[in-house]
Image (cartoon, helix red, strand yellow):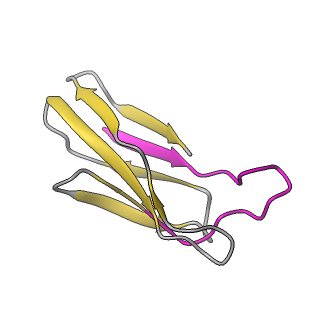
Amino acid sequence: MKIFVSVPPVTPTAAAPTGLVTIRTAAQTFGSIRLELTNFLTLPVDLPVGQTELFADYAGDDNYTAVTSAVLPLTVTKGIRLLCISG
């Protein structure tokens, strides 16, 4: 499965967020990307079939404070290949 995360600015005229975004569960970190390079990331992940909860941690920058997303409950089935998260 791959996770696709998009982090757009708050408004079209606002400064684009920069800094680090990390995708994780309570027990495992899948990866991080610096938003200075791009405003989206795609991570390959290996999640077991069943229930899990994902989080996105944003480290913040000069314009935006650090934040952890709300829990994203996820039911993993054998057919899921891509999960899209938009911020």
Name the foreground residue: 70 vs 40.
70
Say above or below: 38 vs 51.
Answer: below
Q: Position of residue 23 (x, y in %)?
A: 36, 55
Where residue 79 appears, x then y in whole percent? 27, 21
Where is residue 57? Give x, y as percent.
Answer: 41, 60
User: Which residues are drawn in magenta?
Assistant: 1-21
Indicate left or right for 83 with 46 as reference.
right
Q: Which residue: 44% across, 50% down?
A: 69
48 displayed left or right of 34: left
Residue under the image location 35 percent in, 42 percent down = 71
Residue 33 colored magenta? no
Quadrant into which the N terminus falls: top left
Q: Nearer the viewer, residue 32 or 55?
A: 55
Residue 8 in the magenta stretch? The answer is yes
Judged by its main secondary structure, the magenta piece is loop
Number of marks in the image? Answer: 0
* 17 lies above or below 81: below
Q: Is residue 9 left or right of residue 60?
A: right
| Residue 21, percent from left and from top | 46, 63
Outermost residue toward the right in this view: 13
Vertical placement of 8 versus 66: above or below?
Answer: above
Residue at 67% in and 51% down: 8
The outermost residue toward the bottom is 62
Residue name at image x 63 percent, y 67 percent: 64
